[in-house]
Image (tube, helix red, strand yellow):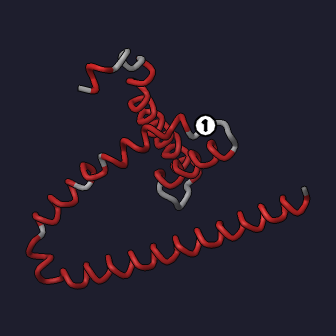
Amino acid sequence: MMLALRVRAPSLFTRCQVPIQVVLYALLYLVADRIVTLLHLPLPANIVGMLMLLMLIMLRILPVSWVKAGSRWLLAEMLLFFVPAVVAVVNYAQLLMVEGWKIFLVIGVSTLFTLGATSLVVDRVYRLEQRLAARKSADD
């Protein structure tokens, strides 16, 4: 019903926005992979690519609106990226029966450490932003 009430169809730019942004992510990954290979960095290329994307956004070279639709689509379709992991679990059912508790313990502990580290970083950044805002308001 809503489709029939729409005045006009979405523009070509709107329809191509997500594929273009996903291609941008892929290009950033390929550039990051080359950088990691050439400089022998001890980081995975996806981390270097995310850092490059963060720097492009922070330096205002790349507006957030240019990557928002693609990132939302990738997050919405994230389940598809975990299908190979689920298939691998099915293939190694015997391993899970014998060593499964160790694997789940490691997953649980690492998840807790990740959540803890993330919460600490978010708290520190939030406090820093509050101090900067208070300093800015005091200067005005």
**Amino acid type of the residue that numbered disc 1 sits on in the rendered structure:** Pro
Residue 19, position as x, y percentages in the image = 38, 30
Q: Is residue 72 above or below residue 134?
A: above
For label 1, count other residues whose C-alpha is less than 10 Å away and answer few (under 14), some (14-19) or many (20+). few
* Horizontal relation, residue 136 to residue 37: left or right: right
| Residue of label 1 | 63
Residue 24, position as x, y percentages in the image = 48, 34
The residue lying at 37 percent from left, 82 percent from top is 109
Q: Quick one: which residue is furthest to the right in this view?
A: 139
Q: Is residue 33 above or below residue 94?
A: above
Q: Secondary structure at mark 1?
A: loop
* Horizontal relation, residue 10 to residue 38: left or right: left
Which image quadrant: the C terminus? Answer: bottom right
* Horizontal relation, residue 36 to residue 55: left or right: left
Residue 38, position as x, y percentages in the image = 56, 47
The residue lying at 33 percent from left, 47 percent from top is 76
Q: Quick one: which residue is furthest to the top in this view?
A: 8
The residue lying at 43 percent from left, 43 percent from top is 71
Q: Is residue 140 above or below residue 55?
A: below
The residue lying at 25 percent from left, 79 percent from top is 103
Q: Nearer the viewer, residue 128 or 83?
A: 128
Asked where in the image residue 93 lies, by quadrant, the reply is: bottom left
Which image quadrant: the N terminus? Answer: top left
